[in-house]
Image: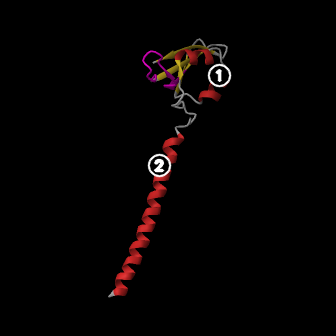
Amino acid sequence: MARKNHAAWQIGLAIGGVALIAFVTVVGLVVVFAFSGPSSTKTGQSVQAGKLTRDEFRKKYTDASKETILKDLGRPKSTSDYSDNTSSWHYGGMTRDPISGKDDSATTIWIGTDGKVSYIDFN
């Protein structure tokens, strides 16, 4: 009978050890991913931390080329073309309202006939 108890204890310790290692691994992964922060996917979504205010965004991108916008912000969620050869590029909230401190829900970049940013609108 003592041998059966001894074997049961060994099996229990082995299972407990495996469970403890699995638990520590999962907790470690959660901590790593939780503190690594979000990253840009270049699909019209900016990095959450460090969003620019509206004025900072305007200063940085007014008169910027389409190439610069694509390089910095990625592809827009959608675009609209107009008969006067201008277009608007629609992104998810890329900026922060300086008064409320809340993230804007949308940013629209207007591209002029020269291929550069002529106006930026925030919602």
- In the rendered image, residue 94 lying in the magenta stretch gets the answer yes
The one of 10 and 37 positioned closer to us in this rendering: 10
Contact between marks 2 and 1 (CB within 8 A): the answer is: no
Q: Nearer the viewer, residue 35 or 91?
A: 35
* Three-letter code, disc 2: Val
Give the amino acid at mark 1.
Answer: Lys
Q: Position of residue 82 (x, y in %)?
A: 55, 15
Secondary structure at numbered mark 1: helix
Query: Is 43 part of what is drawn in magenta?
Result: no
Residue drawn at (47%, 57%) of the image = 24
Q: Residue at x 52, y 37 (%)?
A: 38
Q: Secondary structure at mark 2?
A: helix
In the image, residue 83 lies at what x, y percent? 57, 13
The C terminus, quarter of image: top left
**Which color scheme is applied?**
secondary structure
Looking at the rendered image, the disc whose residue lies closer to the viewer, 2 or 1, is: 2
The span picked out in magenta is 89-104
Task: Characterize the local packing of mark 2: few (<14), some (14-19) or many (20 or more) Cα atoms within 10 angstroms.
Answer: few
Mark 2 / mark 1, whichever is N-terminal? 2
Q: Which numbered disc covers residue 30?
A: 2
Q: CA distance from mark 2 to mark 1?
A: 38 Å
In the rendered view, does 66 fall on the left or right side of 105?
A: right
Q: Residue at x 41, y 68 (%)?
A: 16
Q: Quadrant of the N terminus?
A: bottom left
Task: Residue 115: name its quadrant.
Answer: top right
